[in-house]
Amino acid sequence: MTMSYSQLLIDAEIVRMIRRIMQGIAVDASTLALDVIEAVGPGGTYLNQKHTMRHMRRESSQARLIDRRMYDHWLREGGKDMAERAAEEARRILETHKPIPLPEEAAKEIRAIIEEAEYEEGLRK
C-alpha cells in the first residue's frame, strides 16, 4: 500500500477550509458593526479598527499550506507552491514527530484486522 503524505496534508487543508465554510457567517448587530461603518465613513479603512481585528482572525480561514501573500513577496520568499510546502511539511513531521504508542490491546486488535483482510485477499495463508 502506498500513499502521498504531501497529498494527505493538502487534503487536510481543504477539509479545514470546508469546515470553516460550513460554519457559516454570523450576521447580527455585533458582526454587522453599523456603528463602525458610520464612524469610518466612505473611503475609510477598517484595518485599524478594533472591531475588525477582533473579528478578522475568527472569520477567515487560516491556511497553512496556501500562501496568500502578494506575488512579489511570495517570489522573494522562494515562490514555493502548495505541493512544495506540503512536501516540506510532510518531511518535517516525519523527521520530528514522536507518536504516542497505542495501548497493546489496540495494537493487537488492529494487527488482527489487517491479518484478516490479508487472508481474505489471498495475501496470507
Image: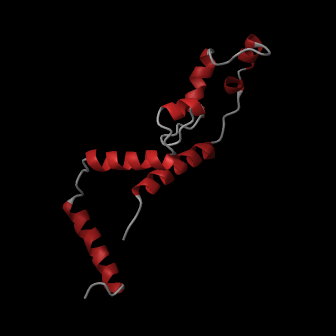
Position of 93 with respect to 27 (left or right) is left
Q: In x, y percent, where is residue 102?
A: 24, 57
The quarter of the picture where the N terminus appears is: bottom left
Q: Is residue 83 visible?
A: yes
Q: Quadrant of the C terminus?
A: bottom left
The answer to whether 71 is drawn above or below residue 104 in the figure is above
Q: Decide which of 67, 59 is in the foreground and name it.
A: 67
- The extreme left residue here reads 104
Q: Describe residue 3's horizontal placement relative to residue 109 as left or right.
A: right
**Depth check: 69 or 98 in front?**
69
Can residue 97 be seen at all in this image of the molecule?
Answer: no
Where is residue 67 shown, x and y percent of the image? 53, 38
Of 1 and 116, nearer the camera is 1
Q: Residue furthest right?
A: 42
Q: Which residue appears at 48% of the width and 50% of the height?
A: 83
Residue at 36 percent across and 85 percent down: it is 121
Instruction: Judge whether 61 appears above or below 1 on screen.
Output: above
Q: Is residue 109 above or below residue 55?
A: below
- Residue drawn at x 48%, y 42% is 80
Q: Position of residue 78 (x, y in %)?
A: 47, 36
Residue ID at (26%, 50%):
99
Please state if 109 lies on the left or on the right of 75 as rendered: left
Q: Is the residue 13 above or below the residue 79 in the image?
A: below
Which image quarter: residue 115?
A: bottom left
